Amino acid sequence: MTSWQITRIVAGLIVLVTLALGAPASPLFLSAWWLWGTAFVGANLLQSGITQWCPMEIFMRKLGVRGGA
């Protein structure tokens, strides 16, 4: 797997987990504050798409994961 694939998988997991923990209709509901995690990931994905700069992808490459194609 490449760094961009892992980055997007992690982002998707964070969105799903924070939605499950923050949505009042969810059986896993803890607090609506969890929805800030969803907003944070969404803002970072938007920023990454516009600027082509992603901090997590840089971090993954430093861990030795190969870059995207």
Image (spheres, helix red, strand yellow):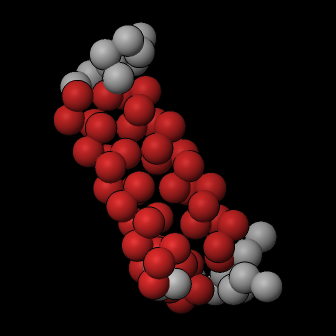
> Which quarter of the rendered picture does the N terminus lie within?
bottom right
User: Is residue 32 visible in this depiction of the protein?
Assistant: yes
Q: Position of residue 32 (x, y in %)?
A: 23, 28
Residue in the picture at 39% in, 37% down = 18
Q: Position of residue 14 (x, y in %)?
A: 46, 47
> Residue 43 or 5: which is nearer the viewer?
43
Number of dots carrying numbers: 0
> Which quarter of the rendered picture does the C terminus lie within?
bottom right
Q: Is residue 66 left or right of residue 62?
A: right
Q: Position of residue 53 (x, y in %)?
A: 47, 84
Does 37 appear above or below 62? above
> Residue 43 or 1: which is nearer the viewer?
43
Q: Is residue 9 left or right of residue 56?
A: right
Does 14 appear above or below 4? above
User: Is residue 59 visible in this depiction of the protein?
Assistant: no
Q: Position of residue 67 (x, y in %)?
A: 69, 86
Residue in the picture at 50% in, 37% down = 16
Residue in the picture at 52% in, 84% down = 52
Does 55 appear above or below 38? below
Q: Residue furthest front?
A: 50
> Residue 49 or 23: which is nearer the viewer?
49
Does 8 appear above or below 3? above
> Residue 38 or 21: which is nearer the viewer?
38
Residue in the picture at 55% in, 56% down = 10
